[in-house]
Amino acid sequence: MITIGFTFLVAFVVGGLICVIGQLLMDVGKLTPGHTLSILVVVGAILDGLNLYEAFINFAGAGATIPITSFGNSLTHGAMAEAEKHGWIGLLTGMFEVTSSGISAAILFGFIAALIFKPKGKVD
């Protein structure tokens, strides 16, 4: 019987490893945060396209659904599901249908944060 503590540990370790990979891409690979973000989203999308991400979620739980790789998974998963129902137009509508609430929340909370806090530029 798997305990809840072990489930939390696996999620923590897997999510942490995804973050370590992203940090290594920036530090060792000298990639920008935008490039790193794009790579991780594309990796998540490819894994979902190969039907591997669902098994990854079953193993790691929140360790696989919280990091940015899950966004790529959601985009691909929604597009493929809607493409089966509506054909080619479903490829476009499906990915936005599944991810629209997360994108909307990010925009809203980013706007609120911009109103509350004053950004500071780099001091030379």
Image (cartoon, grey):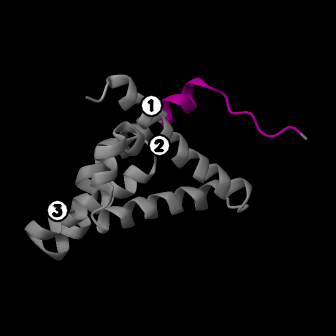
Task: Estimate the x, y position of residue 82 in percent, counting from the top left.
Answer: 16, 63
Q: Earlier in the sequence, mark 1 or mark 3?
A: 1
Check residue 113 for magenta coloring. Answer: yes
Q: Which residue is mark 1?
A: 9
Given the image, on which type of amino acid does mark 3 rest? Answer: Ala
Task: Estimate the x, y position of residue 44 in percent, counting from the top left.
Answer: 40, 59
Q: Earlier in the sequence, mark 1 or mark 2?
A: 1
From the viewer's perspective, is residue 112 above or below residue 85? above
- The mark tally for this picture is 3
User: As drawn, is 105 to the left or to the right of 110?
Assistant: left
Q: Earlier in the sequence, mark 2 or mark 3?
A: 2
Residue plotted at (45% across, 44% down): 67
Check residue 76 for magenta coloring. Answer: no
- Label 3: few (<14), some (14–19) or many (≥20) C-alpha neighbours in 10 Å: some
Q: Which residue is mark 3?
A: 81
Mark pair 2, 3: CA separation: 27 Å
Given the image, on which type of amino acid does mark 1 rest? Answer: Leu
Instruction: Name which quarter of the figure residue 102 lies in.
Output: top left
Disc number for residue 14: 2
- Label 2: few (<14), some (14–19) or many (≥20) C-alpha neighbours in 10 Å: some
Task: Estimate the x, y position of residue 88 in percent, counting from the top left.
Answer: 18, 76
Residue plotted at (47% across, 34% down): 12
